[in-house]
Each structure stands twice: as structure tokens, then as C-alpha cells.
Amino acid sequence: MPIWMLFAGATLALVIYKFRVWRHAPADVRSSIVPVCTGGLAVAAGAVLVPPSVGTALNNFVGIPSLSVLLLNSFTLMWACSAHAMLLYWRHQPQQAWRTTRWIMVAYGAVIATETMLFFLGAPEEHHKDFTLVYADAPWLGAMLAVHYSAYSVAMGGVVYMCWRWSLNEGTANRAWLRRGLRITAVGLFLSCAGTTLILIAVLGRWHDAAWSDASITSGQQFSVAALPLVIVGMTISAWGPHVEDLRDYQRLRPLWRTLRRAALPRIRRHRGLADWTPESLLMWRMLEINDWLHRLHHYCGPLASAPTIADRTTTSSASDRDRAMSEAARIRLALDARRRGATTSARDVAEPSSSNEQTANVVAAAERSWLVGVSQALHSRRVDALVRRHRDQLSPKTNPYAEATTTEVHGGPAS
């Protein structure tokens, strides 16, 4: 029971979040949010009814044996209908999506009405947990099960096709989390579709006294249970996935940020609006500070290769990007060494940035973000250590600040 309550709670939380989005969304966007809310409510209600203790208690309260099974079937079809509508609204304009959605609603409504009629004609006894096993070959109830699993298998097959086809569309090429969500949803719904198809075959086999039907029904139900977490993750990952990635890159930038911070470089003023605690803002502020500190180090940079432009980073290979990131990391470390040993810089190099808008526009670029993460990860690698040592060894004794010197004065004291 706790696992089903967990599913119900997670889905209900998604519905509440989407309802809040719906309240503030423009009128032309609201229609695309409604299927998400209705489908989430159907899944949450179905998850609550799955445990036998809840389903049986409801049946006893209402006085209709096995009514919870009919409700579960209805909620399942409502979810399938909402999934169809949701994909239509995501892919097409609201007017076009509604023209198709209303016919889908009529079709699903007809299936639910047919199941309801067959259920009451069959007048089952109380069998919430093993309804399919008991009534697979009953005159009216067997037909009800065949109608339900046939409709659901066809519906989910269509949704799987729509999700997978959309994930291959060029429109999702630059929307990684949407593409992942569509594919995870497609896999989850494929498992659910496979499970219901297996149950349908078992129900038809029961009509012909097949010995394997009971085992197939049980296996099909387990497939459907295993599909549920995948569907929940797939349907919600586009909402929370980017925040997880922001937090990951925020942590991966920590070595570079901490190294620059320890250098006691002046820090830019924290502008209003960036000081909140959302993952996106935390990452943006960390990148702003890093970029500003790197700007202040330009005067100290040695002769190693400078950082490539954003255009360069989008056209070079991954191996070349790694080499450039290591060169930049070595350049930063040499610049910090030069600063610690007393080099001076001009006022222009330490001036506060005149505007944060240009900085903000630059740091949110995906190429810039990927570049800084690469530099941060390479900063303390062995290859960068070797680059720094090689650069120091190539300098002449007269110009080498790392060579031993007991008489050279640097800011009033002997160099070490």
C-alpha cells in the first residue's frame, strides 16, 4: 500500500503544480495544461484504489461488490484519453488539437459506457484483487474485460508511437529533457501495453480453456505495475530534469570557483534578482563570478593558448575541446601564480562591469556553460600539472619568477 500511496502523492503534487501554472498561463496555453491535470487526477485516484484494503472498503461502503474494479478501469481509460489529448495539444495548435480530441473523448466515453453496462449485467461478487482471474470466462464480465484490454492496448500503442516519433523529430533536437521524457514515457507505456496485450490474450485463451491463461494474466499485471514509475518519470522529467542538471553543473564548477575565490580577487556586486536559491539562479551567479574573476586575470595570463570563442567551441571536436580546456586551466593557474608573486594590473582590468545584462546573456549560453565546466574539471588534473611545470621550466632564469632568487625585491620583500 505505501508504494501506491507514494505514486498517488507524486502525481497529485504534479497536478497541483500544473494547476498553479494554469492559473497564470495565457488563455491560448491553458487548454494544453488541462489534459495534464485530468490525467494526473485519474492516475492518482486509480493508485489510491489499487490496494485491496481501500478498494474493498469502498465496495462495502457503496454496497456494490467489485465496483472498485470498474472505477479502476474507467480511471485507466481516462488517463489514456488525457495522454492522447496532451500529446495533441503539445504538437498542434489548440483549435486543431480540440477537433481531434473531442472525437477521442467520444470514443473513450463509449468504451467506458460499454464496460459499465456489461459490469452491471454480469453482477459480480466481491473480487477486487483477483477479478480478472475469476471472471475472465464469465458471460458478461469476460466480454467487459476483453473490451477494456482491447481498447487500452490500442490506445497505448498509439500513444507509444506518438511519443517515440516525436522524440525523433527535429523540433526536440535542442530540447534534451523533453526528448528523454518522451522516450522514457514511450518505454513505460510500451511495457504497460505489452502487459495489457498479454492479459487480453490470456482472457481469450480462457474462453478456450487454455491452461496457461492464469499465469499470463499475473505476468501481464506485473508488467503494468512496472510501467507506472517509468511513465511518471517520463511525464515529469522535462519539468524537474533541467534543475537537476543545473545543480550538477553548479557543483562541477566548484573547483574553479573555489580556486579563484581563494585568490582574494575583488567580487562583483550582487544584483537584485540573482540572490535567490533556485538552481538556475545559483548556477547563473556562480558563472557570473567566475567570468568576472577570469576577466580580472587577463593581465597575468601567460603565453598559453587563450580560451576559444563560443563559435569555435561549437565546431571543434570533443578531444580538441578537452585540450583547450586543459590549456585554459593551466593558463589560469599560471596567472594566479603570477598575481601571488606580486605582478600588478591596470585599473581597467579590475573595473567593475558596467552592466550585468551582457554578462547574464553570455553565461546562460550552453556553449559557455559547457566550456567553464570543462575548465573546472581539468583545473587540477595531472595533465594540467604537467603543462604548468613545462611552462615554468621553459622560462629563462632572468624572467623565471619561479627560479630561486635571494636578492630580487618584490613589493619590498625577497622573492621566495
Image (tube, grey):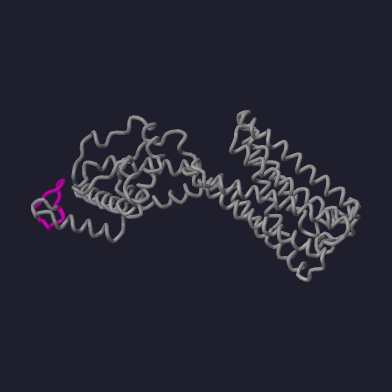
Q: Which residues are magenta?
A: 401-416
Quadrant where the image shows the N terminus: bottom right
Residue 187, how many percent across, how many down? 60, 55
Q: As displayed, is residue 214 above or below residue 402? A: below
Residue 28, how many percent across, how many down? 62, 29
Residue 228 is inside the magenta segment? no
The image quadrant that residue 282 belongs to is top left
Comparing 414 with 217, the one in front is: 217
Relative to 12, 376 lies left or right:
left
Residue extending furthest toward the top: 27
Query: Residue at the spot x=13%, y=57% of the render?
Result: 403
Query: Residue at the spot x=34%, y=52% of the render?
Result: 318
Query: Residue at the spot x=29%, y=48% of the render?
Result: 263
Relative to 323, 21 lies left or right:
right
Residue extending furthest toward the bottom: 211
Count of numbered marks: 0
Quadrant where the image shows the C terminus: bottom left
Comparing 25 with 353, the one in front is: 25
Residue 334, how many percent across, how many down? 22, 51
Relative to 232, 198 lies left or right:
right
The image quadrant that residue 69 belongs to is bottom right
Residue 396, how many percent across, how many down? 9, 54
Residue extending furthest toward the front: 208
Comparing 370 with 395, the one in front is: 370
Main SS category, magenta section:
loop
Comparing 134 with 282, the one in front is: 134
Q: As displayed, is residue 33 above or below residue 399? A: above
